[in-house]
Amino acid sequence: MSKRILIVDDIGFIVEFESTVIDALSKEIKQKILIDSANSVHEALAKIAQNDYDAMVVDMNLPDGTGIEIAKAAQAKNAQTRIAALTIYPQKFEQDHTYFDAYFKKPILPAVYKENVRRLLQL
């Protein structure tokens, strides 16, 4: 059974990094992980409306809003979706722990990111 993850970040090379690491994880564990990406709150909300996600990794500071808006919408649609915040300042957002299952601190090494995503997807 495949898993589906949404990556939300406004910086292209970060989305590319995350996708590459998740693809490597998928091959390593021999389980298909479908990856969608969004570059803004608006785009993420549209993807959430169209799809069900097992997990999301959300940048907290986006040009048109915050990751909290995305997390609230995702939880309203499916309370089982596991959500991680990816941020330089994880302690700044820890008060919003009701919306997030994990906090990933930027910068993040590929091996650490892979292990964090593995836990987030419960693999």
Image (spheres, rainbow, N blue to C red):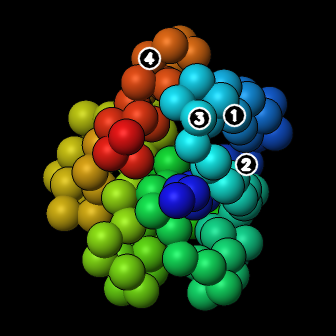
Separation of disc 1 and disc 4 at Cα?
Answer: 15 Å
Q: Nearer the viewer, mark 1 or mark 3?
A: 3
Label 1's element? Answer: helix
Q: Position of residue 109 (x, y in %)?
A: 53, 12
Residue that numbered label 2 is attached to: 10
Q: Are marks 1 and 4 in contact (CB under 8 Å)?
A: no
Earlier sequence position, callout 2 versus callout 3: 2
The residue drawn where x is 66% and y is 85% is 50
> What amino acid is labelled 1 in the image?
Asp
Q: Which residue has dot 4 on it?
A: 112
Q: Report helix, strand or loop for mark 4.
A: helix
Mark closer to the observer (3, 4): 3
| Alpha carbon distance from label 3 to label 4 | 19 Å
**How packed is label 1: few (under 14 Cα within 10 Å), some, or many (20 or more)?**
some
Tell me the residue at 63%/48% (across/down).
32
Query: How many other residues sit within 10 Å of disc 4, few (<14), some (14-19) or many (≥20)?
Result: few
Front residue (pair 66, 113): 113
Nearest to viewer (mark 2 / mark 3): 3
* Amino acid residing under circle 4: Val
Label 2 residue SS: loop
Cα separation, mark 2 vs mark 4, equals 21 Å
**90 with respect to 38 (left or right):** left
Q: Earlier in the sequence, mark 1 or mark 3?
A: 1
Q: Nearer the viewer, residue 89 or 18?
A: 18
- Reading the image, the residue beneath label 1 is 23
Going by the image, does 106 lie left or right of 39? left
Determine the image quadrant of residue 15. Answer: top right
| Residue occupied by mark 3 | 30
Mark closest to the chain's N terminus, 2 or 4 = 2
